[in-house]
Image: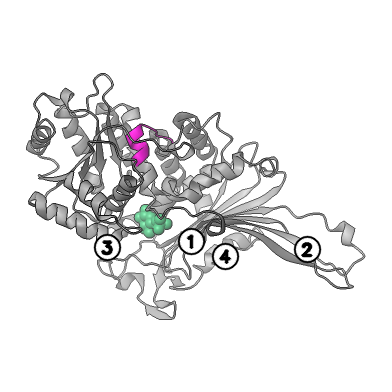
Amino acid sequence: MAAIFKTGRQADPCTMVIFGASGDLTKRLLVPALYNLKHAKLLPEGFRLIGVARSEHPNDAFREDFTKAIKDFATGPVVTEQWDDLVSRVSYLSGAFDDPATYQKLLDDLTEAGGGPDAIGNCLFYLATAPEFFATIVERLAAAGLTREAGETWRRVIIEKPFGHDLDSARALNTELQAVLAERQIYRIDHYLGKETVQNIMVFRFANGIFEPLWNRDHIDHVQITVAETVGVEARGGFYEQTGALRDMIPNHIFQLLSFVGMEAPTSFAADALRSEKVKVLDSIRPLDAASVLTDAVRGQYGAGVLNEKPVWAYRAEPKIAPDSMTETYAALKLNIDNWRWAGVPFYLRTGKRLPRRMSEIAIQFKRAPIAVFRDTPVEDVGSNLLVIRIQPDEGVSLQFGAKIPGTALDIGNVKMNFQYKDYFQSAPSTGYETLIYDAMIGDATLFQRADNVEAGWKVVQPVIDAWASRRPRDFPNYEAGTQGPRQADELLARDGRVWRKI
Ligand code: BG6
């Protein structure tokens, strides 16, 4: 059962080995998350952390780097004794990821007390490297005997995003990993699953009696999922040029949201029960083909504009971006889920950079009530009920409904009931990685992607990737930074008589 639904016990004794330990992810997210786990007394007794990266670093310098990282990126006040204790458990190992000698050194380090690979206890290997190293690292770990589980001992590998670049590469990576690891040893991260508000979708749906009976095509008109960002490509131009908004956000993060909203109730919150339901929703999506990509998929790229009253560069003027780049920074899709629950209920998805506001939400638009009863009144239209699950920022849930506007005439206005997390819960600040790291330490894969989950996501978007690769966009840049996105995205909904919610 997922750790989120249990009270925390200390994680199993283990050593964590981070590959890519001097990178950004480690400093910004993993170090603060480990500190938060330490603070919450969830890290195991005798915990050790070994950082592996290519550059040469003495242990002390590496620990200093971590101490700087915690100063810069801690999510709350840091208790000195706790930090000192954590950092004293950190050591560094320098080596190339493809060099078998690195793994021999790692083995020596882990077996300081003597004995072979079977004597070193539980190990959690975290691959925070560039994706081209994932398969090599796992293969080398296996060759050194470090992934072999004996008796009660476990060896687990956390794989960061991006998992593949398209369906074929994701399948190939799965094959390479599964050649040396059992599926239960593989923890594929999607950091959206670490977000409380994403986990809450399951609780909202399945712990309340009043929503689920309405959660289907009889009552829901359509669903809009938006992940809007104000940031541009920042310092990640090299990566983003090869990736684009579709690959970066849709088969992974946005499909997590879609799966939780669309899935059937799992038989339990056991990892496989939940993951099997998630994969079924993605498998039920009507496959797109070249013709439907033309009508149901929209891509965009931002030009220069104004955001938060400041001028911002066009995408093509950002560092490491080609001046004639054809990479999309915005993607919108209309998807149909052809199953009994959702047939006829379109799911509209959109994501983009340099949009006016950071806003991730799921909007469930219910069908309108019949107007007939208001026939002889001034009411011309009844609004429709709208349930909005706000993922970030301003986390919460709101329900919009019609109310009589006070006065002698009968008129209706839309009003909102609004739940905000901050009004009810004082959650400890977190990076979102705490639950994920902790779950991997206790062997709970509920919030990780199984091989088929990842492949199902790529399968849905592959026709879009192919169609977009074969036709160059003619109008890039087609939206100004700081605006709602390309006009074609509005047209996509307008053709169905609908409009996007304003970002
Ligand atoms: C990452 C993408 O996976 O998710 C980024 O590579 C994106 O481009 C980020 O900005 C969004 O995450 P969050 O948690 O800020 O919504």
Q: Secondary structure at mark 2?
A: strand
Q: Image quarter for residue 447? A: top left
Of callouts 2 and 3, the N-terminal one: 3
Q: Residue at x 47, y 34 (%)?
A: 275
Position of 74 with respect to 338 (left or right) is left
Gap in angstroms between the C-alphas marked 4 and 1: 24 Å
Kind of residue at disc 1: Pro
Q: Is residue 175 visible?
A: yes
- Is the C-beta separation of discs 4 and 2 under 8 Å? no
- Indicate which label's residue lies in the foreground, 4 or 2: 2
Of callouts 4 and 1, the N-terminal one: 1
Q: Residues within 10 Å of mark 2 (few under 14, many from 20)?
A: some
Kind of residue at disc 4: Asp
Image location (x, y in percent) of residue 198: 49, 48
Gap in angstroms between the C-alphas marked 3 and 1: 21 Å
Q: What numbered label is drawn on residue 72?
A: 3
Image location (x, y in percent) of residue 158: 30, 39
- Is the C-beta separation of discs 1 and 2 under 8 Å? no
Gap in angstroms between the C-alphas marked 1 and 2: 28 Å
Q: Secondary structure at mark 1?
A: loop
- Indicate which label's residue lies in the foreground, 3 or 1: 3
Tag 1 residue: 393
Position of 192 with respect to 210 (left or right) is left
Q: Residues within 10 Å of mark 1 (few under 14, many from 20)?
A: few
Magenta stretch bounds: 438-446
Q: What numbered label is drawn on residue 403?
A: 2
Camera-side residue: 10 or 271? 10
